[in-house]
Structure formats: structure tokens, C-alpha cells
Image: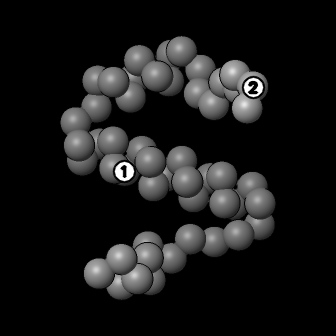
């Protein structure tokens, strides 16, 4: 796999400064945005039930 930049440097620096709660929110929001671009949805409660 070639070196593909997923996030830019500024975003990376912001992520490094986040605490666990802020990072969790960021990841969920980022994932929702990616799924939205693909026309898919993400059901967090269903995922939690599946993982439990």
C-alpha cells in the first residue's frame, strides 16, 4: 500500500491535543462524515449492542 495521507498535518496536531472524550467525539463525527459521503448511515447503538 502506498503512502496515502489520510489527515493533514494540522488535523493531526489537533488530534494529539485531545483527551479521550474529545477524541471519541471526533472519530465518530469523522466516521459519520465518511459514511455520509458514501450514502451510508451509521447506527452507534446497534454497533454497541453488536460489540457487547
Which of the marked residues, 1 or 2, is nearer the chain's N terminus?
2
Residue lying at 77% horizontally and 60% vertically, measured from the top left: 38
Query: Between tags 1 and 2, which lies in front?
Result: 2
- Report the residue marked by disc 1: 25
**Closer-to-camera residue (1/45):** 1
Extreme residue toward the front, this view? 1
Residue lying at 34% horizontally and 50% vertically, measured from the top left: 24
Would residue 48 be found to the left or right of residue 1 on screen?
left
Would residue 37 be found to the left or right of residue 24 on screen?
right
Mark 1–mark 2 Cα distance, whole angstroms, equals 29 Å
Task: Tell me where residue 10 appears, x and y as whole percent.
Answer: 51, 16
Work out which quarter of the rendered image holds the C terminus and state it. bottom left
Q: In what element is the residue under mark 1?
A: helix
Task: Tell me where residue 50 appears, x and y as whole percent.
Answer: 40, 83
Q: Is residue 16 above or below residue 36?
A: above
Residue lying at 62% horizontally and 53% vertically, measured from the top left: 33
Task: Tell me where residue 15 appears, x and y as whole percent.
Answer: 38, 28
- Report the residue marked by disc 2: 2
Residue 49 disc label: none
Q: How many badges with numbers are in the image?
A: 2
Task: Tell me where residue 7 appears, x and y as whole percent.
Answer: 59, 27
Residue 47: name its quadrant: bottom left
Q: Residues within 10 Å of mark 2 (few under 14, many from 20)?
A: few
Residue 16: name its quadrant: top left
Residue 20: name its quadrant: top left
Residue lying at 46% horizontally and 22% vertically, measured from the top left: 12
Amino acid at each position: 500500500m502506498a503512502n496515502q495521507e489520510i489527515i493533514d498535518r494540522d488535523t493531526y496536531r489537533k488530534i494529539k491535543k485531545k483527551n479521550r472524550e474529545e477524541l471519541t467525539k471526533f472519530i465518530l463525527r469523522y466516521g459519520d462524515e465518511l459514511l455520509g459521503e458514501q450514502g451510508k448511515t451509521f447506527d452507534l447503538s446497534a454497533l454497541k449492542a453488536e460489540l457487547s
